[in-house]
Amino acid sequence: MSTTTTNPTRPVGDSVKRIDALEKVTGEALFADDLQFGPGLLFGRIVRSPHPHALIKHIDTSRALAMPGVKAVVTGADTPKQIGLYLKDRHIFCRERTRYVGDPVAGVVATSEEIAEAACKLVEVEYEVLEPVLDPLRGMAPDAPLIHPDLGNYEVPNFIFPKAGTNISNHFKIRKGDPDAAWALCDAIVEDEFRVPHVQHVPIEPHVAVAKMDQRGEITLWTSSQSPFAQRNLIAEALGLSQSSVRVIAPFVGGGFGCKAGVTMEALAVVMAQKVPGYAVKLRLTREEEFFTTFVRQGLIARTKIGATADGKIQAMQTEYFWDAGAYTEYGVNITRASGYSSTGPYEIPNVRADSYCVYTNHPVGGAFRGFGMPEIHWGIEQIVDMLAEAIGMDKAEFRLKNCIRTGSIIATGSTMHPVGLVECIKQATAAIHWGTEERASAPHKRRGKGLAIMWKAPAMPPNAGSSASVRFNEDATVTVSVGGQEIGQGAFTVAAQMAAAALGVPYEWVRVEGPIDTQYNPYEWQTVASRLTWSMGNAVMAAAKDARRQVLDLAAEHWGEDVDHLDIKDGMVISYRSEEAMPLKKMVVYGLPKPAGQGWRGGPIIGHGSFMPSYVTGLDPETGQGPRSVVHYTTGCQAVDLEVDTITGQVTILRIAAAFDVGKAINPDQVRAQIEGGAVQGASTALFEGFQLKNGKLANHSFVDYRIATSVDVPFEIIPIIIEVPQDDGPWGARGIGEHSMVPTAPAIANAVADAIGVRVLELPITAEKLYLALEAQADGMPV
Amino acid sequence: MTTHHITFTINGAQEEALVTSHITLLAFLRERLGLTGTKNGCATGECGACTVLLDGEPVNACLVLAAEIDGADVITIEGLAHDGELEPLQQAFIDHTGTQCGFCTPGILISARALLNRNPDPTEDDIKDALRGNLCRCTGYQRIINAVQDAAKAGG
């Protein structure tokens, strides 16, 4: 709060406290499972496929239906139309075929969770088990079993390219320059394969949805959701309803990270509710279900070749991505696209070839996860760049500074880079860990190492994803901001209030943001994903507040008989710089102002509207991936890691992570730092601990005991957050997103520091103590590592 | 179904209830008493989101049967603030941005309360150790640790 008196854009740029903090520390903040529905509430449970790939030959629900307390049983027969955010490739309940262990086959509605669960065991399903596809490379093979034989008939937008008759749901290509010719020029070429396992988002709040259909057939859905509007749209389309007949009410989200975006289990609750008109049906996933029946982060096999000339300039890069997308691809097809056009990482490389394949497998369904493909691809990019720097014999920070994108660089899609502060990020992050200075390990059996990784990420979304907002005054001049963007912990409501306050000229404390998000009342927002709210929703809030402000100033100008250009609103007062008149906003913003001599009134309740949609994102050529503006913008950054490896146990102890990101403008610097810190720890957790153990498509580690995430004792390290601000031309006050970016470079930065410490390159995540121990053993035996 | 008549104190108020043998304290608090501040994150004692104080000790409410609280004193997140006044711990979580999505926050505040009750001047390691059973996926923990230290300095 240090700058409140001098900051000209206040409260934008001030570290005000979170607008939702009081509710959250008192237990008063309501989450979806906290909403009360009374004794008439029914409960749903799901019958799930035990096989990774099977045909459903027959379902008999009669025994389940006969059980006392059971109200309804639904199956795929109740869901004829397909659903999907991009590629409509799934039925809400399976019809002829199941495609992963956990695929919903039937749903039981009963008077209690216990009865519903017991009745699920009475639903008899006869399967014909098919050969599963358990690896994307196998899925690409011409003789692989087809998981979606009807792929060629699915509805799909024009920037996704499924290949009928294969398991490939999207193939994105970059063809820039001539890599084949460029290899001959290179003095060093490095080639390797990098692997990333599936991981799960692990929000502490599991998915929960309550659905109700009234006697008119209108649906209300209360759910923990990042995407109330997308859910309304997709569920309405899949059920043949008008969007106005589906109302989604979404209170605070207890952690999302992407797994509560798009449509997952919510549609199951809606279909079950359709069978019991007038009753609300609650479906709450168990923690076990949370691990493998909602979205997971896709697995990845990345093959990369990169070469540079002796002067340290990268000349060519060639990449193949094989995404283990799982049984369906809500987001996977677009992750494939985003990873393709960002496949060079934040480097200017003249010759690029990239092929990114989204491959169906009989694994859990891949979805969006904080970073949307970027943590996965940077795992390989940032290690191979390190390896190339070694091969050329250059300092790794210097090598990156020589090759990284700068303002005006031509990126992989042929687009021109907007103003960017990546160079400054690299310089400041490395300086913060004393890059280039050898430091001593804390014990003789420990080795100290330093590493860095840089990153870029653009919001990956349809080119026309829109936002809207309204800003209205109350009698006492307090302000209610209404948005469709969701508060998932990232601080979206706080920055919305700051922006409205700054644009209107009222104190932050006067502003409230409406919740829960209700599609019946709140203005449209595409989805709370892609780190796009501060930027896109922020633009809408700013426009709405400016609209309201203009109405107030027009009214005051007429009242005072002055030119509107001489008027301003400061601290809740309308003032004139010319006449030095001043009046409070109070009352006039609702009741208007009296005309002279009892001639009536002018003005009226002030309500401002604003919307924003980028209109400048161009399509990319389907054969070359080239286009003038592939994305709205990129956020860039750098993490530098200082760590120790215990050579007896293989255990990694991180000492420091310095993390610098160019956020354009920090609307709330403290919240930006909180994102940078939280992302570094989530990134470190995926780097050191996390990974699915899938055996024949079945997840073996589906509890917090077997799937470890970082706890309070795992983060003994210092995090040094650094904010760089090179303004974004299309962002409110110059802001761009930061939520996801903060975990993108963490895993490769740690891997690079481990390599620096002990000379071991880990090519497959996670970097477990066991892996390092075995590598050190092999190293001691003189084996290559 | 066997039922039990239980008498207990909840957030300072004496209450009694008839409960079935199998209902957990978590379900009893959330569904019978409407105290939804205590969260259900895993129902298997692994995440700490349902931590409450049972006779001053932090327990996972999902692993305690409601029948077991007969004669006991239970404090939930709703019992921390008094007469509209936040506890120093709660204020410190606001000041340090110790909360993001907020779902783990009630359990963490209760674990921290238990720590400060038994150790008013904890070291950083004491705090980490006291919170190791409370998972948080958003904050990265450091701000939470700083908040608890700050609250301890402010007299808990």
Image: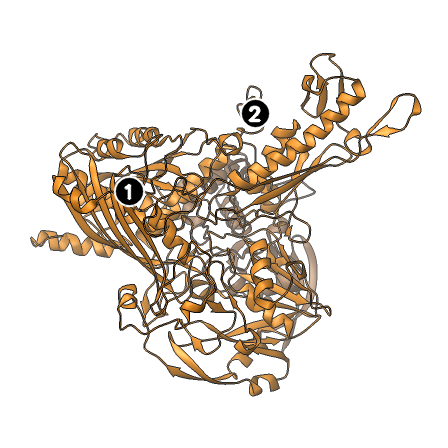
Rendered residue at 63%/70% (across/down): A273
Q: Nearer the viewer, mark 1 or mark 2?
A: 2
In the image: residue A565, left or right of residue A201: right
Label ID, residue A769: none
Q: Name the residue tied to disc 2.
A: A9
The chain letter for the residue carrying disc 1 is: A
Q: Position of residue A414 (x, y in %)?
A: 33, 40
Q: Is residue A197 above or below residue A393?
A: below
- Where does the N terminus of chain A fall, quadrant-wise? top right
Q: Colour of chain A?
A: orange
Q: Which element carries disc 2, helix, strand or loop? A: loop
In the image: residue A552, left or right of residue A157: right
Q: Is residue A433 above or below residue A465?
A: above
The chain letter for the residue carrying disc 2 is: A
Q: Name the residue tied to disc 1.
A: A749
What amino acid type is highlighted by mark number 1? Ala
In the image: residue A651, left or right of residue B48: left
Q: Position of residue A330 (x, y in %)?
A: 45, 60
Q: Which element carries disc 1, helix, strand or loop? A: helix
Q: Position of residue A586 (x, y in %)?
A: 77, 29
Q: Is residue A301 above or below residue A214?
A: above
Residue, far right: A598
Q: Which chain is brown?
A: B
